[in-house]
Amino acid sequence: MPDHAHAIVNNRSGTISDWLRRVRGNSARKILAWLVAENHLLSLGKLTLAHPQKRKHTHAVWQKDPSVIDLWSRRFVRQKLNYLHLNPVRAGLCKHPAEWKWSSYRAYLPHKPGDVPIEVDWRAYWTDEELNQPA
């Protein structure tokens, strides 16, 4: 999405908060450095904070308190995947989820290896035993 991102994450080591802190910190530094290097002052200005934060941060790329939801069943994971995949359609950015360039939608459809930029690894969410149980 142009103004936000969604992710379904299973952080096997550490907490989701640890993962979010690393992803948000690393990406914010890279985004801000790129904006400065490319002289995108208008965009940089939109990210300027009214008052510097702790550690003297003067810009914010990410929302302060992101929404985190525990996904506790296969059905719930699929429900959230459907929500994520339909988000650009509901926003009027495309007519079908497969048209959205940054969507994982195509990875869930039958395809040849290498035809999509990512592959789904359900083992990251469920054990082999759980995967073989009916939903």
Image (cartoon, rainbow, N blue to C red):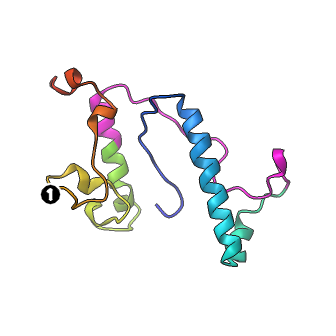
Is residue 77 highlighted in magenta?
Answer: yes
Give residue 22's position: percent from left, percent from top. Answer: 60, 43
Count the numbered circles shown. Answer: 1
Q: Can you say whether 113 is above or below 43 in the image?
A: above
Q: Amino acid at mark 1?
A: Lys
Side (left or right) of 43 relative to 11 = right
Residue at the spot 62% in from the left edge and 63% down from the top edge = 31
x and y, in percent, of residue 133 in the image: 16, 23
Q: Which residues are magenta?
A: 51-80
Position in image of residue 131 (x %, y %): 20, 27
- Predominant secondary structure in magenta? loop
The residue carrying mark 1 is: 112
Does residue 119 show up magenta in the picture? Answer: no
Nearer to us in this view, 106 or 51: 106
Is any atom of residue 113 visible in this view?
yes
Vertical side of 76 occupied by 6: above or below: below
Residue 66 shows up from this direction: no
Which percent across, then down, holds residue 32? 68, 64
At a point 54% along the width and 61% down the height, the residue shown is 3
Q: Which is nearer the eye, 48 or 14?
A: 14
